[in-house]
Amino acid sequence: AQSVAQPEDQVNVAEGNPLTVKCTYSVSGNPYLFWYVQYPNRGLQFLLKYITGDNLVKGSYGFEAEFNKSQTSFHLKKPSALVSDSALYFCAVRPNNRKLIWGLGTSLAVNP
Amino acid sequence: DGGITQSPKYLFRKEGQNVTLSCEQNLNHDAMYWYRQDPGQGLRLIYYSQIVNDFQKGDIAEGYSVSREKKESFPLTVTSAQKNPTAFYLCASSTPGQATYEQYFGPGTRLTVT
C-alpha cells in the first residue's frame, strides 16, 4: 500500500538552531511532494513542493526541503528556527496524478 | 487561509441532529475537498468534487453528504448517521488541471456534538 510516514510525532529545537522535520514515502512512480504548516485552530498553509529538477526546494518563511530519491525522503529544514515556527507540519505525496496521501503530522516546538 | 471561507468557526449540536458546514471560495478553483482532522490521525478525505454537479466519496464518506451546485460553494452535511462527528473539519480547493497543484485551505470549523 502506498503511504507517507512522518516518523517523529514531535520535534523540539532551541531558537536559532537548525531544524529538520522528516518525511519518507512509499509510492510508485515519480510522485509530487508537498509540505504544509498548520498553526493552532487554523487551516493548513502551503509551504513548498517538489515536482522535478533541483533536489533542494525553497519555500515560504525560510523553509526548504531536500528530495532524496534513493531514500524516498523529503525532509523539511530551516537553518535557524524561530519561536513562531512552532506549529504542526504535514507532508503530503501525490503519486501518478492521483489523490494526495497525507502524513500524520509532526508537532514542532521551538523553545526560546 | 486565502480566498476560502468556512462558517461558523465553532458549531455545537445535539446528538441526532443533522448539521451543515459552509465552504465558499473565490479563487475560481474547479476542485474542492472536505477533510476531517482528529488528534493524531492527520487529515482524512471525506468527499471531493472536481467540477460542478459532480462529487466523489473519499476515504471516510459514511455519515456525510455534500452538494456542488455552484463552483464557489461546497457545503458538507454531517448526518445523524455519523457515529463520531465531533472533529475539526477543513475545506480546501485547487485547480485540478495541473498535477502539480497544491491545495488551499479554509480556516476550519470545529464541530462538537453532545
Image: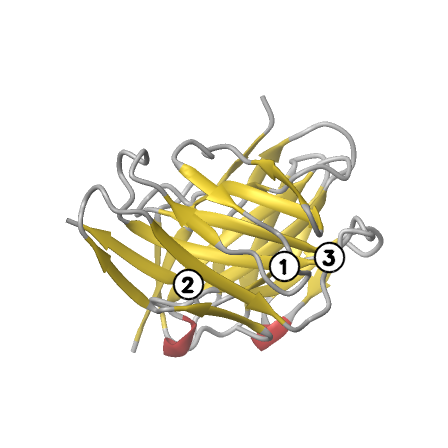
Q: Residue at x 35, y 41 (%)?
A: B79
Q: Position of residue B114 (x, y in %)?
A: 14, 49
Q: Residues within 10 Å of mark 3 (few under 14, many from 20)?
A: some
Residue, disc 3: B30
Q: Residue at x 46, y 62 (%)?
A: B22
Distance between mark 3 and mark 1 Cα atoms: 8 Å
Q: Position of residue A90 (x, y in %)?
A: 49, 53
Distance between mark 2 and mark 1 Cα atoms: 13 Å
A47 relative to B36, above or below: below
Q: Tell whether label 2 touches label 3 (CB within 8 Å).
A: no
* Observer-nearest of B70 and B27: B70
Q: Report helix, strand or loop for mark 2.
A: loop
Q: Quarter-wise, where is residue A41 in the image?
A: bottom left
User: What kind of residue is marked 2?
Assistant: Gly
Q: Tell whether label 1 touches label 2 (CB within 8 Å).
A: no
Q: Residue at x 32, y 36 (%)?
A: B82
Q: Residues within 10 Å of mark 1 (few under 14, many from 20)?
A: many
Q: Is tag 3's residue or tag 2's residue first in the polypeptide sequence? A: 3
Residue, disc 1: B93
Number of marks present in the image shown = 3
User: What kind of residue is marked 1?
Assistant: Ser
Q: Tell whether label 1 touches label 3 (CB within 8 Å).
A: no
* Observer-nearest of B13 and A24: B13
Q: Position of residue B44 (x, y in %)?
A: 46, 41
Distance between mark 3 and mark 2 Cα atoms: 20 Å
Q: Is tag 2's residue or tag 1's residue first in the polypeptide sequence? A: 1
> Which residue extends farthest top?
A1
Marks 3, 2 in one chain:
yes
Q: Report helix, strand or loop for mark 1.
A: strand
* Observer-nearest of B1 and A31: B1
